[in-house]
């Protein structure tokens, strides 16, 4: 089977792990935008799949971008199936649906959206066109699949995460604790809690700072960047904890496995909004695979991702988050227990191999 896999997410090097593994099962070519907003290029991996780079109009805008020259690529590749790694209401998915319809090529789409909400024009019309033409759809979670059904998608539907983790790359590393703490100048005996992601209000990093303020032996490392960074720095200053907070700046996807095993705990205190709830929380499964216990809020899919392999607290509650962090950082036996449960949960549910097996099986169902 020949598959054309179209994915802006795969500009991130570590995200191409899955596509590279998928390319061992099917004859696959990956289509990437030549750039995406201000996102820096990451070096390729040794086993990167065969890749076609195309210019994207409105790059950096998740649901507005389209590709120049995608029709020519379809004609040259002559795929048996196109995988649009995009929401069904995105302009690029509509573009793929139209191009495939003209050529009689089946396609599937992917969806993370876990809230049922009204789509403003023109997205509702785009989604209707995609639903009418798609050979199948993939929901990243049960909630996302449920939303697709409620919106009227009647075709074949699978529930498969967009990507998993490679447990050979994300794994416990006893040496990381010393290395990371030395690099960050963390005092002996202090606990180190990490956050990995975008600095935006809905990720709740300000809640994490407020929780840490009541735990004098706890240090934070905030890995990422975003528009809230200056506000977070100012908040740390007002709380009197600036000396206990490290901002690393952006961490490349290929460097994340070097950081995570050095943490005592990873926290994801996401906050739901009227139009968004946490759709998965990739940092959670990366930390769990790395043998790091996790604490997350009860926003969106976090509880179902963590299961019984970590702690889930009420979103927005500083006291609840502080209590959970205190419980883990002060109890080594509990940390070890949850670390073991977390890695076992990832090996059971969230490996790249499991995602690829389910994805390739779904390809066979719809072609």
Image (tube, helix red, strand yellow):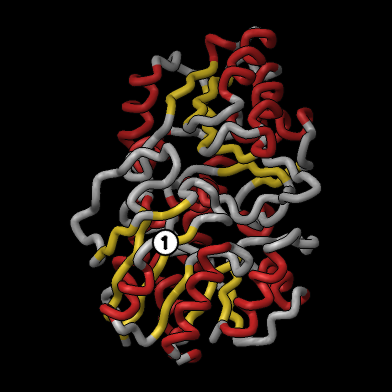
Task: Please tell me in which quadrant of the rendered image residue 18 appears.
Answer: bottom left
Q: Is residue 98 left or right of residue 268?
A: left
The N terminus lies in quadrant:
bottom left
Residue that appears at 70% across and 28% down: 207
Task: Please tell me in which quadrant of the rendered image residue 111 appears.
Answer: bottom right
Give the number of marks: 1
Q: Position of residue 125 (x, y in %)?
A: 69, 71
Q: Is residue 78 left or right of residue 324?
A: left
Q: Secondary structure at mark 1?
A: strand
**Residue in front for this viewpoint, 284 or 122:** 122
Dot 1: within a 10 Å radius of its alpha carbon, few (fewer than 14), some, or many (20 or more) residues?
many
Residue that appears at 58% across and 56% down: 63
Q: Is residue 184 left or right of residue 62?
A: left
Residue that appears at 45% across and 47% down: 291
Q: Position of residue 160 (x, y in %)?
A: 54, 71
**Residue in front for this viewpoint, 235 or 244:** 235
Residue that appears at 62% across and 48% down: 310
Whether residue 284 can be seen here: yes
The C terminus lies in quadrant:
bottom left
Q: Position of residue 154 (x, y in %)?
A: 69, 86
Q: Position of residue 97 (x, y in %)?
A: 52, 77
**Residue in front for this viewpoint, 155 or 165:** 155
- Residue carrying label 1: 67
Whether residue 167 can be seen here: no
**Residue in front for this viewpoint, 180 or 225:** 225
243, above or below 319, in the image: above
Q: Is residue 219 left or right of residue 239?
A: left
């Amino acid at each position: 089977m020949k598959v054309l896999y179209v994915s802006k997410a795969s500009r991130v090097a570590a995200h191409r792990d899955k596509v590279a593994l998928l390319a061992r099962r099917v004859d696959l070519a990956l289509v990437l935008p030549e750039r995406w907003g201000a996102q820096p290029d990451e070096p390729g991996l040794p086993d990167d799949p065969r890749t076609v780079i195309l210019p994207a109009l409105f790059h950096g805008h998740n649901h507005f971008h389209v590709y120049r020259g995608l029709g020519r690529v379809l004609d040259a590749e002559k795929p048996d199936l196109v995988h649009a790694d995009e929401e069904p209401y995105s302009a690029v998915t509509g573009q793929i649906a139209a191009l495939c319809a003209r050529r009689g090529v089946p396609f599937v789409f992917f969806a993370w959206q876990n809230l049922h909400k009204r789509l403003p024009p023109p997205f509702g019309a785009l989604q209707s066109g995609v639903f009418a033409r798609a050979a199948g759809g993939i929901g990243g979670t049960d909630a996302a699949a449920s939303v697709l059904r409620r919106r009227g998608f009647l075709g074949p539907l699978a529930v498969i995460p967009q990507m998993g983790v490679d447990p050979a790359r994300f794994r416990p590393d006893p040496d990381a604790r010393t290395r990371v703490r030395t690099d960050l100048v963390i005092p002996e005996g202090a606990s180190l809690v990490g956050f990995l992601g975008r600095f935006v209000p809905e990720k709740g990093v300000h809640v994490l700072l407020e929780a840490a303020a009541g735990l004098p032996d706890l240090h934070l490392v905030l890995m990422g960047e975003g528009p809230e960074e200056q506000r977070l720095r100012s908040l740390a200053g007002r709380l009197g904890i600036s000396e206990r907070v490290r901002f690393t700046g952006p961490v490349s996807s290929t460097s994340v496995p070097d950081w995570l095993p050095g943490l005592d705990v990873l926290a994801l205190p996401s906050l739901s909004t009227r139009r968004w709830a946490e759709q998965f929380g990739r940092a959670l499964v990366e930390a769990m695979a790395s043998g790091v216990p996790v604490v997350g809020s009860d926003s969106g899919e976090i509880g179902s991702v963590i299961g019984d392999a970590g702690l889930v607290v009420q979103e927005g509650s500083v006291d609840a988050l502080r209590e959970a962090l205190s419980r883990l950082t002060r109890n080594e036996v509990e940390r070890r227990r949850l670390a073991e449960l977390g890695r076992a949960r990832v090996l059971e549910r969230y490996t790249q191999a499991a995602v690829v097996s389910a994805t390739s099986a779904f390809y066979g169902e719809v072609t």
